[in-house]
Image (cartoon, rainbow, N blue to C red):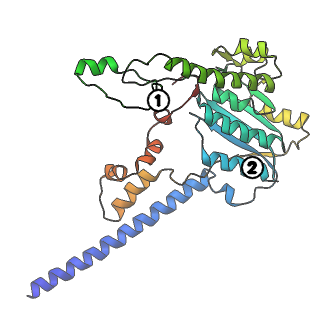
Amino acid sequence: MTLDIDTILDRRQLRRKLSFWRIGAFLTLIIAIIAVLAASGSFDGLTKPGAHIARVTIDGTIVEDRELLKMLSKIEEEDDVKAVMLSINSPGGTTAGGEAIYDAVRKISEKKPVVTSVKTLAASAGYMIASASDHIVARRSSIVGSIGVIFQYPQASQLLDKIGVSIEEIKSSPLKAEPSPFHTPPPGAEAVIEDLINDSYNWFVDLVAERRSLSRPEALKLADGRVYSGDRGLKNKLIDAVGGESTAKQWLIEQKELDKDLEIKDWKPLRESDGLPFIQAISSWLLGKESNAVHAISVLNPDDLPAIFPKRLFLEGLLSIWHK
């Protein structure tokens, strides 16, 4: 009986020690995360930075990003932001996503100057957003352009025939949900989509013509879907100067009379879900729960999948994108 009591006491003491070290490890991890975030400037927005130029990075595939749009709206109203520098490195994305960001940038430009610094690439919807700014700067070897719209859908009808699977449909009209990947499009289906594409394409062309001070024939000549180097883009009036961020800032100083001592500060949209799968896996292990990292991902809501997999897998609707 005494041995059983001693064993129980030993186990309780062992559990206390284990809990202590788990809590200690967890606190250490939290401190380390805070230190990394602080070093990366994630807390910069918590303190008032004073007068500055806001750098907004548009990177990767463009979608209608609510958090980015909220941030752009805040920049529009922030008195300490004296100018905005868009830093773009994107092949494009959804046409609607590009339009939303374009409109937000145009609203900012009504109150303060906006300049774009193209990194490697500003194509399709990426170029659409760049054209919303007052001045575009790109490297000589940067890629710009790809003015156009695309609609893609898979065609699996031959594969279904080979494996003996058929898709039966009952619908209100022949053009409902067409074109379909499960059968050859009926007469008129592709013409409807082509009309839709042309409507968005003409809007894109007119937008470029207006923003780049081109005639419509000049814009149409450039809008055959091709991309241009920064050097060729300058000759074709798609950009205003060859250079980098220093060139863009110099334009703000000379043409918009900004103080040369103004610092460029990064503005980043607040994303609550950033890094959650990893953090959940670590915290679950430290708290003594399911230790398999796969578990932390498997319980995610399907709506969280775009945070794990590339955005390009989830694009839908009309696309303004150079390369997928």
Residue 203 lies, in percent from the top left, at 70, 25
Q: Nearer the viewer, residue 27 or 65?
A: 65
Task: Name, please, the residue furthest toward the front.
Answer: 172
Does residue 287 sit above or below 279 in this rendering?
Answer: below
Pointers 1 and 2 in contact (C-beta within 8 Å)? no
Q: Nearer the viewer, residue 294 or 186?
A: 186
Q: Is residue 287 above or below residue 80?
A: below
Give the residue drawn at x 40%, y 51%: 301
From the viewer's side, name the closer residue of 241 and 182: 182
Across and down, in percent, residue 317 comes to 54, 31
Element type where label 2 sits in the image: helix
Quadrant in which the N terminus appears: bottom left
**Residue 106 shown left or right of residue 60 in the figure:** right
Residue 285, position as x, y percentages in the image: 33, 59
Towards the viewer: 258 or 144: 144
Residue at 58% from the left image edge and 37% from the top image edge: 63
- Percent of width and height locating residue 177: 45, 30
Disc 2 crowd, CA 10 A, few/some/many (<14, 14-19, 20+): many
In the visual, does 183 lie left or right of 113?
A: left
Judged from this view, the residue extending furthest toward the bottom is: 2
Identify which amino acid the numbered label 2 is placed on. Ile
Instruction: Identify the residue shown where x is 64% and y is 37%.
Output: 58
Quadrant housing residue 111? top right
Residue type of the residue flagged with mark 1: Lys
Between the residue at mark 1 and the residue at mark 2, the CA separation in whole angstroms equals 42 Å
Pointer 2 residue? 75
Q: Which numbered disc flags the more N-terminal residue, 1 or 2?
A: 2
Q: Which residue is mark 1?
A: 176
Quarter of the figure with residue 240: top right
